[in-house]
Amino acid sequence: MMRIAIPLFPGFTALDAIGPYEVLSRVPQARVDFVADRAPTSIRTDTGQPAITVDLALADLPDPDVIVVPGGFGTRAVIADPDAPLTRWVAAAHATSTFTTSVCTGALVLGAAGILDGLEATTHWNLLDRLTDFGATPVSQRVVVQGKVITAAGVSAGIDMALTLAARLAGPEVAQLIQLAIEYDPEPPFDTGSVDKAGPELVAMARANLSKLENVAVR
Amino acid sequence: MMRIAIPLFPGFTALDAIGPYEVLSRVPQARVDFVADRAPTSIRTDTGQPAITVDLALADLPDPDVIVVPGGFGTRAVIADPDAPLTRWVAAAHATSTFTTSVCTGALVLGAAGILDGLEATTHWNLLDRLTDFGATPVSQRVVVQGKVITAAGVSAGIDMALTLAARLAGPEVAQLIQLAIEYDPEPPFDTGSVDKAGPELVAMARANLSKLENVAVR
């Protein structure tokens, strides 16, 4: 049984965690668990709700095969704390993991755990430059694979990352079947999903909105 | 304040609910609540975990502006019960809603509530034919808009539906900004997300997998 751990922390982004969960929970012979500093508990997202229940503590699953760290405004508090249990757990679990991955600003937690030093990596477009703080080379790509370290761009990119990961864990046919099962044949109604496509005016407005949301979230 | 309700039931599919949640929670002057038969409670998904906490009962929010019904294997138990509180709530709330929407097999619940009679609608590809049971004309499209009734295809289609809905609720610029904020510029690693693209062999395998999962889920 392959063990996949998705660590949650207050202020994670719901879709960052649930996108990969929906894909990876369908990998045969794999078990996906949400984990948190302590358990059982429930952890609120960066919008205040919903909360997701967590049955296992970090200490209950010290050596998962696969780690998926979601992002969210809550990552700021995690990386600001040099003794954050989550960061220590990620660093230790990475020593024996088959894959260590992140979605969105989950990459900052990988960085704080010392995992991105010398690697190419990506994160949410709004914080891409921050990756240099951890010795990483920021790359504006949807999914960046560097050996066993895989980082994804913002929020929804976790679905693409998880399908890429599923193909590596269980073969391309399994990943293709999962993609069909979740009917992942996206038709975004607009063409504004990336900085390049959205253009400078929308990007400036989105940045301002994100700052406002962050100020509320970390109040 | 616009009220948006996402009713949950045991055995819903996590991404069906969280995809639209992530989009709609970013609509200005809107509040999104998960609701359930009774509250507070937490409701398990069709994979057994995670559970999402629910703070409001159906009776606490009888007249939301927008209804988003997710799918999942749990819809079968809902539609099999002619007195299901969820179905009664959807039927009553639809009378005053601005938009009544579904993701995946959430369409079956709209159907059981009598909402799809005479309309075109969509659902997960594996149950598309079932829509005729409710007087609907099945349409193999990502998002089907029929006046105030909007249905989406399987699981991941809820993100496309919610962006379409956000544009109607708050204008296209707001929807475009949300699409950028969640970096929704999808790059599926395979081209197998629909029945047509996957081809008959993968479709047959996916159907068999889904049957197995359903048998486990409704055990």
Image (cartoon, coloured by chain):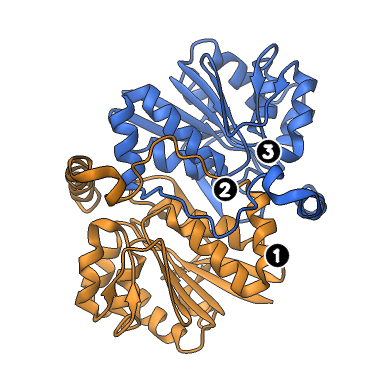
Chain colours: A blue, B orange
Viewer-side residue, B133 vs A196: A196
Mark 3 secondary-structure assignment: loop
* Residue B55 x, y percent position in the rendering: 55, 64
Of all chains, the one bearing label 3 is: A
Of all chains, the one bearing label 2 is: A
**Residue ID at (27%, 80%):** B83
- Numbered badge on residue A124: 3
Three-letter residue code for mark 2: Ala
**Residue ID at (19%, 76%):** B133
Q: Are marks 2 and 1 in contact (CB under 8 Å)?
A: no
Of all chains, the one bearing label 1 is: B
- Judge the density around disc 1: few (<14), some (14-19), many (≥20) Cα neighbours within 10 Å: some
Residue B187 lies, with reference to residue A137, above or below; the image says below
Three-letter residue code for mark 1: Glu
* The quarter of the displayed image where residue A21 is located: top left
Q: Which residue is mark 2?
A: A14
Residue B174 lies, with reference to residue A81, above or below; the image says below
